[in-house]
């Protein structure tokens, strides 16, 4: 989240972590983030992910603009 903050990317924490903040914790061992992506911010997001170490070479910056695009980062617990 610090990487997204430093790049000025808007995002929202969702999933088990968000539920745990508002009610009983639900430990899921992952973090789900919903990112607000609009042109031309998609290129900034792509660069931010690359700087963080995400495997962005598997996608194209333009794909980040697709409404149903999902980017998985990391390995399953």
Image (cartoon, rainbow, N blue to C red):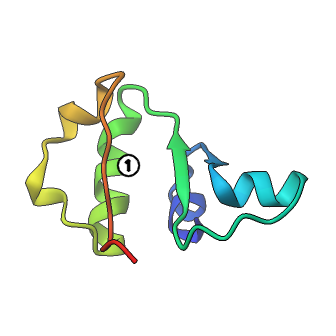
The secondary structure type at the circle numbered 1 is helix
Q: How many marks?
A: 1
Q: Is residue 21 above or below residue 46?
A: below
In the rendered image, residue 7, in percent from the top left (x then y), is placed at 50, 57
Q: Is residue 51 above or below residue 60?
A: below
Residue drawn at x 34%, y 72% is 76
Residue drawn at x 28%, y 75% is 53
In the rendered image, residue 12, in percent from the top left (x then y), is placed at 64, 45
- Taking depth in this image into account, of 12 and 15 the one nearest to the observer is 15
What residue does disc 1 label? 45
Residue drawn at x 54%, y 73% is 29
Which quarter of the figure has residue 73?
Answer: bottom left
Tell me: 74 left or right of 62: right
Which quarter of the figure has residue 21?
Answer: bottom right
Q: Is residue 52 above or below residue 36?
A: below
In the rendered image, residue 39, in percent from the top left (x then y), is placed at 36, 26
Look at the image and tell me in which quarter the N terminus lies.
bottom right
- Taking depth in this image into account, of 67 and 52 the one nearest to the observer is 67
- Taking depth in this image into account, of 19 and 5 the one nearest to the observer is 19
- Taking depth in this image into account, of 4 and 40 the one nearest to the observer is 4
- Mark 1 is surrounded, within 10 Å at the Cα level, by few (under 14), some (14 to 19) or many (20 or more) other residues, namely many
Of all residues shown, which one is farthest toward the top? 67
Look at the image and tell me in which quarter the C terminus lies.
bottom left
Tell me: 39 left or right of 57: right
């Amino acid at each position: 989240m610090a990487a997204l903050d430093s790049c000025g990317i808007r995002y929202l924490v969702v999933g088990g972590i968000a539920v745990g903040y508002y009610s009983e914790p639900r430990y899921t061992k992952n973090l789900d983030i919903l990112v607000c992506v609009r042109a031309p911010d998609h290129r900034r997001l792509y660069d931010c992910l690359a700087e963080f170490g995400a495997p962005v070479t598997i996608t194209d910056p333009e794909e980040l603009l697709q409404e149903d695009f999902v980017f998985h980062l990391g390995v399953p617990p």
